[in-house]
Image (cartoon, helix red, strand yellow):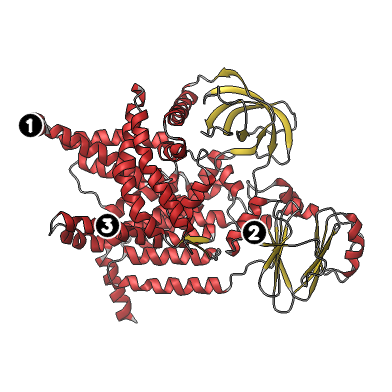
Amino acid sequence: MSVTVTKITEMLANDRNRWFTWSPVMLAFGIGIYFGLQWQPSPNWLLLPVFLSVVMGVALKLRRSGFFYGVLILFLISIGFSAAVIRHEVVKAPVLEKKTVTEVTGVVLEMGSSSKKQRLILADLEFGAKNVPSLDKIRLTVRTGTSHIKPGQIITLKAVLLPPPPPAYPGAYDFQRDLYFKSIGAVGYAISKPHVTGEKNTLIDGLNSLISRNRHQVNQIVSENAPNETTGFSIAIMTGERSSLQKKAVTDMRQSGLAHLLAISGLHMGMVGGILFFGTRYVASLFPTVALHYSVKKWAAVLAMIGITGYLLLSGLPVSALRAYLMIGMIFIAVCFDRSALSLRNLAFAALLLLFFMPESLHGASFQMSFSAVFCLIAAYERYGLRFTTAANSGGSLRRCIYYIGGVGFTSIIASLATAPFAIYHFGSVAALGIVANLIAVPVMGFWVMPWTLLSLISMPAGLSELPLQMAGYGIMVILKTAAFVAKLPSSSLQIGSYSAGLLVMISLAVLWTGIWRTQLRWGAVIFLLVGLVFQAFNEKPDILFADSGDLFLAKTQDGRFKISSLRSDRFERNRWESMYGIQKFDKIDQKKINDAFIRCDPLGCVWTQNQNLVTYSKNWMSQKDDCFRADIILSSSPVGRNCSASSTKLIIDKFDLWRKGTHAIYFNENGDLKVESVNSVRGRRPWVSARYHQSID
């Protein structure tokens, strides 16, 4: 045993320069603990890192290195936890509790680019109704009368305000939490045309408005000068705004594995920085006096930094762009100080900054997929990149071309494998033929679309962007047609269904363990995978789902199929359910077919037997009287009377339960016994959870 411990210690010591790479993982653990709690930690928890830092100081003084590193790990975890607590204190704001119709006056912070409808984010709000809390920001969809509106203006309109949407099922992605950390307390839609009543002129709001106005102006210029078929794509890669993209194009890009081209990330940021850096050096080389007597390389790095900073601001600061900016920025800074850039360290440093200042991003698919893809690519090229480059440069142009195509294919395979676990977990599907599409689309994007896109941005102030946008459009059309072709191929997108969060965490740790360590320690990743399989073995999917609206329910038949009550009601929830189960489309219950072997429905409701339980669904009080005396489980879209307490009834879920707790999930075991979860019971007493749930458990 002591020999094994000594050997492990030696291997850890040999990889000492990789220890820093684990620091963002420790922060992520602390953030995960914060969001996994069912109660809101108080600011007093911020004293924990202070206490642990004192303990570390004592350990150093006593020269207890093992104890010191153990406390250091706890310290980093506490930093992640504290970062989440601090972030909550910074962004916390009231949240709307019920639907309200009111007049709204506010400053336009952001607006989309779609010509059919605009999504506005308003701040500095005033409401006509007295029962609306002092919301910090709201998000409104406006369909008409927005052509004259610009960010920074004060507008007045009448709107329907709604509480932020809850998760579609227990354990699903929490949109309420996401909006809460953006300080958005309500969503809704306008029912009148907006009127401009003034303009905000304070310094901070002026800077925000300037950035938003520039983004909006770029969107307008692209809309006026780019081909109609490529306008949405061009706007997406310039400003990160996707509202102008056609739904079919988005679907094709996702199913073909090309959706990453729509997100401003490493490819886009790297191309902008690379073009500016190498372009500046090439131009300077044309003037020998300048090239020989001045540090042109550093000039180019500074110019590239300025360029990618502007591109980052123009993009709207998405997580993928922030990660790419931090990594590429550190490379250019290293050039300025004549230092070499360590890629994994850069990635770890970028992750540390994002997790510390935006801890809520940990749960987002963008953060997870972006960092996973880059981490796996860096780890793979660390081991095989030099060998690959040497082989490519040992021949002529044809050999380099072949190796380039092979490199694109290798990169696509690594990136696809790296993002697949997260795509399956969040979306229930994975693009199986992504490598085919990427072999065509990535070179077109890198060598044609991005250079012309950058040239169009540079030429916009002079009003000369039409030609570059037209030229970029040819490449974009190639990408869109490639996506459409691959998406139509059989099994282009595999519907698998989501799996447990525990398995996702264990897969992530296994990948990190394999990529970071360079000794035999990396074989320990197998342990994480085995633990993940244990988590998955205990993972269950609901046998019945009952949406919080009361208009939609799903039931699992004896042969393992799923039947859903409607294909019109709660479409968003239904789509999320399909992703979770890995089903292309649910079978709809035919309420006119009274001979259905599984379920019988009439205008008042439905009745079926599931796992030895008689289940009823009632639409109103008229059918509840009979249900109370025969059903084991009652689902009702209306309130159920207190006198409905027959001994045979195991469970009643009515309108008030849905109103307080959200969507319900019911699980059966082999004996017919049941377990019930609701959206809010899983989340607990958190600030972004409806106050009526808090009141129901007090």
Label 3 Cα neighbours within 10 Å, binned few <14 / some 14-19 / many ≥20: some
Q: Which residue is mark 2?
A: 170
Q: Earlier in the sequence, mark 1 or mark 3?
A: 1
Instruction: Relative to 603, say whether 242 is above or below.
Output: above
Viewer-nearest of discs 1 and 3:
3
Q: Position of residue 28 (x, y in %)?
A: 45, 55
At 37% from the left edge and 34% from the top edge, which residue is drawn?
Answer: 470
Viewer-nearest of discs 2 and 1:
1
Task: Name the quarter where the N terminus is drawn.
Answer: bottom left
Distance in Å between CA atoms under marks 1 and 3: 35 Å
Instruction: Give the amino acid at mark 3.
Output: Ile
Distance in Å between CA atoms under marks 2 and 1: 66 Å
Q: Which residue is mark 3?
A: 405
Furthest residue in direction bottom, as rendered? 1
Instruction: Assign a secondary structure to mark 1.
Output: helix
Distance in Å between CA atoms under marks 3 and 2: 44 Å
Label 2 Cα neighbours within 10 Å, binned few <14 / some 14-19 / many ≥20: many
At 54% from the left edge and 54% from the top edge, which residue is drawn?
Answer: 34
Q: Position of residue 488 (x, y in %)?
A: 48, 57
Instruction: Assign a secondary structure to mark 3.
Output: helix
Q: Earlier in the sequence, mark 2 or mark 1?
A: 2
* Left or right: 96 as drawn, with respect to 217: right
Marker disc for residue 288:
1
Viewer-nearest of discs 3 and 2:
3
Quadrant of residue 376 within the rendered picture: bottom left
